[in-house]
Image: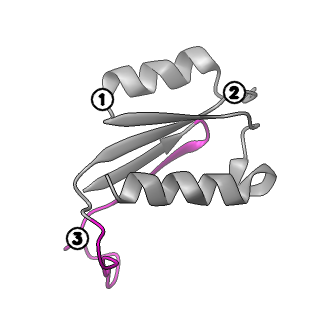
Amino acid sequence: SIRYYWGGGSISSTAGESEGPQEASEGVSGGGAGGITTARDRAITPWLQEKMFTDTPCERVFHMDSDHSPFFSRPFMLSVYFLMIAHM
């Protein structure tokens, strides 16, 4: 199971669930959990983001200088972090 956390929420993906077909890319281990914080998030404060990572430990946490929606403001960097998390 891979869990991606960031200031705006979370996405989880587990093989075998009934959400439709899922294929792992070649070379992706899919065994780790990683996190992404968003430094300028006003919806979910840095304190609450830190609590999320404390309550659900992550192997590695990446920090972005981004607002609440990094998929709009920093899409390239967010995708790089997702790929790095997927390869942990």
Q: Secondary structure at mark 3?
A: loop
Q: Earlier in the sequence, mark 3 or mark 2?
A: 3
Q: On the rendered structure, is 60 left or right of 6?
A: left
Q: On the rendered structure, is 73 left or right of 50?
A: right
Q: CA distance from mark 3 to mark 1?
A: 21 Å
For the image shown, how many numbered marks are present on the structure? 3
Pick whichever, 21 or 36, lies toward us.
Answer: 36
Q: Position of residue 62 (x, y in %)?
A: 52, 36
Residue type for callout 3: Ala
Residue 39 circle label: 2
Count residues near mark 3 (Cα–Cα under 10 Å), then give few for <14, some for 14-19, many for 20+. some
Count residues near mark 2 (Cα–Cα under 10 Å), then give few for <14, some for 14-19, many for 20+. some
Do we see residue 48 in this rendering? yes
Q: Magenta segment, principal secondary structure?
A: loop
**In the image, what residue occupies the spot 41% across and 52% down?**
85
Residue 15 circle label: 3
**Which residue lies most toward the right here?**
73
Residue contact between numbered discs 3 and 2, judged by CB atoms under 8 Å? no
Confirm whether the magenta stretch covers residue 25.
yes
Q: Is residue 50 above or below residue 69?
A: above
Question: Which residue range is magenta in the image?
Answer: 7-28
Identify the image quadrant of the N terminus.
bottom left
Q: Secondary structure at mark 1?
A: loop
**Which residue lies most toward the front here?**
27
Residue at which label 1 appears:
57
Count residues near mark 1 (Cα–Cα under 10 Å), then give few for <14, some for 14-19, many for 20+. few
Q: Secondary structure at mark 2?
A: loop
Residue type for callout 2: Ala
